[in-house]
């Protein structure tokens, strides 16, 4: 009898130890509210709408790790975006339905070295530079990111990617990513054919370097996407102001530098990005250059109440001539550690003329917010009240 008790105790302890060596976490976020814009869509009328995922995109996910011993772990993340207004999947379109459209990867992590992961993952531009944006630091969120995220700061998700992310070495971290085309005979990617632009594939590589210690943070990143129109969700983002079609872009190259400084209850940041859209041979003699200069600050009046202010100047060159000035204001109040309510206001003014067509304003990182054409005016004002809950 004593032996049976001893065996049962040993087996029970082994089960507890094995359980303690691995974990799986369910997490998520829901962001919902009502938005207003004075010029929306081709008819340039005012619009009041239920809008989802502005401060942050609504999502749910699973992440976990298994301790393999010697500081080595197996890790994974599965993250699905969704629209709280109608329950549909995010990061999907008419031809591609993604269960885990935000992230889906598995890999190994080693203490003191870093991790190698495989799957659908963010580029280094998103990983590093989003930390130095008004959209990444305040509830202005996706309304504050640059026009349709052409510089890949918030939605640069790469399919079929291998990614290395280093451990923290005295505040320094770095990483690299490569996204395969997965098409025979087209290691460097291939353009699609026909009116649907189907059958092609994108190739991506990306590098990032960041330093964060004490109150100071500095980062840089570069991303190159060959045939970006074959990457689900890609759009030049400036079709309402540029003669370049998404389907005609052979290569997107974007580089950025950012900095941040923390001072008590205040935080300050600045960012510059340079993005070049190179046209395919035979589709045009000019390319597009997009520069964005951004600065912002936030201040916590109390642990619960935070105000944010951001300013962005965006300039178009080469194939398109124009510039945009945008101001972002936000106020966020935390009801608890997981739930907050907020208000925000955005103003953008555009100027320029391309072949007799005036450059139009377009707030936010997606034309889906206020209609397929962004606006039909050279100015745009947006306001929002929202609630965000994390679990």
Image (cartoon, rainbow, N blue to C red):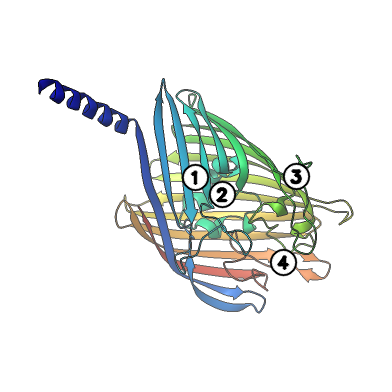
The quarter of the picture where residue 119 lies is top right
Residue denoted by label 3? 189
The quarter of the picture where residue 205 lies is top right
Which image quadrant: the N terminus? top left
User: Label 1 crowding class (10 Å Cα cut-off): few <14, some 14-19, many 20+?
Assistant: many
Q: Position of residue 65 (x, y in %)?
A: 41, 35
What element does badge 2 sit on?
Answer: strand
Alpha-carbon span between mark 3 and mark 2: 36 Å
Mark 3 in CB contact with mark 2 (< 8 angstroms): no
Of callouts 3 and 2, the N-terminal one:
3
Q: Which mark is residue 77?
A: none
What element does badge 4 sit on?
Answer: loop
User: Between tags 3 and 2, which lies in front?
Assistant: 3
Mark 4 in CB contact with mark 1 (< 8 angstroms): no
x 75%, y 44%: residue: 189
Mark 1 in CB contact with mark 2 (< 8 angstroms): yes
Residue denoted by label 2? 295
User: Between tags 4 and 2, which lies in front?
Assistant: 4
Q: Position of residue 298 (x, y in %)?
A: 45, 50
Of callouts 1 and 2, the N-terminal one:
1
Residue denoted by label 1? 268
Q: Residue furthest front?
A: 1
User: Label 3 crowding class (10 Å Cα cut-off): few <14, some 14-19, many 20+?
Assistant: many
Alpha-carbon span between mark 4 and mark 2: 25 Å
Of callouts 1 and 3, the N-terminal one:
3
């Amino acid at each position: 009898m004593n032996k049976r008790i001893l065996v049962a105790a040993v087996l029970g302890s082994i089960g507890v130890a094995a359980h303690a060596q691995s974990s799986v976490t369910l997490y998520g976020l829901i962001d919902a509210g009502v938005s207003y814009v004075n010029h929306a869509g081709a008819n340039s009328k005012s619009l009041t709408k239920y809008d989802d995922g502005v401060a942050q995109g609504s999502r749910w996910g699973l992440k976990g790790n298994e301790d393999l011993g010697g500081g080595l772990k197996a890790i994974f993340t599965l993250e699905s975006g969704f629209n709280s207004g109608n329950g549909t999947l995010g990061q999907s379109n008419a031809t591609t339905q993604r269960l885990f459209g935000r992230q889906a990867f598995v890999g190994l992590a080693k203490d003191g070295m870093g991790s190698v992961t495989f799957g659908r993952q963010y580029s280094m531009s998103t990983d590093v530079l989003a930390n130095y944006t008004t959209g990444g630091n305040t509830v202005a969120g996706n309304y504050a990111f640059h026009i349709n995220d052409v510089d890949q700061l918030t939605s640069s998700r790469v399919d079929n990617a291998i990614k290395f992310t280093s451990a923290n070495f005295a505040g320094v971290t770095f990483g690299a990513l490569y996204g395969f085309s997965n098409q025979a005979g087209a290691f460097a990617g291939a353009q699609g054919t026909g009116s649907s632009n189907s059958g092609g594939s994108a190739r991506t590589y990306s590098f990032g370097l960041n330093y964060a210690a004490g109150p100071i943070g500095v980062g840089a990143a570069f991303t190159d996407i060959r045939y970006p129109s074959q990457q689900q969700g890609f759009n030049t983002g400036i079709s309402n102001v540029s003669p370049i079609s998404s389907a005609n872009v052979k290569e997107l190259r974007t580089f950025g530098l950012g900095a941040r400084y923390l001072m008590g209850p205040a935080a300050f940041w600045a960012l510059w990005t340079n993005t070049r859209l190179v046209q395919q041979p035979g589709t045009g003699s000019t390319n597009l250059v997009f520069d964005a200069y951004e600065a912002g600050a936030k201040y916590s009046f109390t642990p619960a109440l935070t105000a944010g202010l951001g300013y962005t100047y965006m300039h178009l060159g080469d194939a398109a001539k124009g510039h945009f000035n945008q101001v972002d204001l936000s106020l966020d109040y935390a009801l608890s550690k997981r739930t907050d309510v907020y208000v925000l206001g955005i103003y953008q003014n555009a100027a320029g003329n391309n072949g007799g067509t005036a450059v139009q304003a377009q707030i936010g990182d997606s034309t889906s917010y206020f209609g397929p054409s962004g606006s039909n005016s050279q100015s745009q004002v947006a306001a929002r009240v929202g609630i965000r809950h994390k679990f």
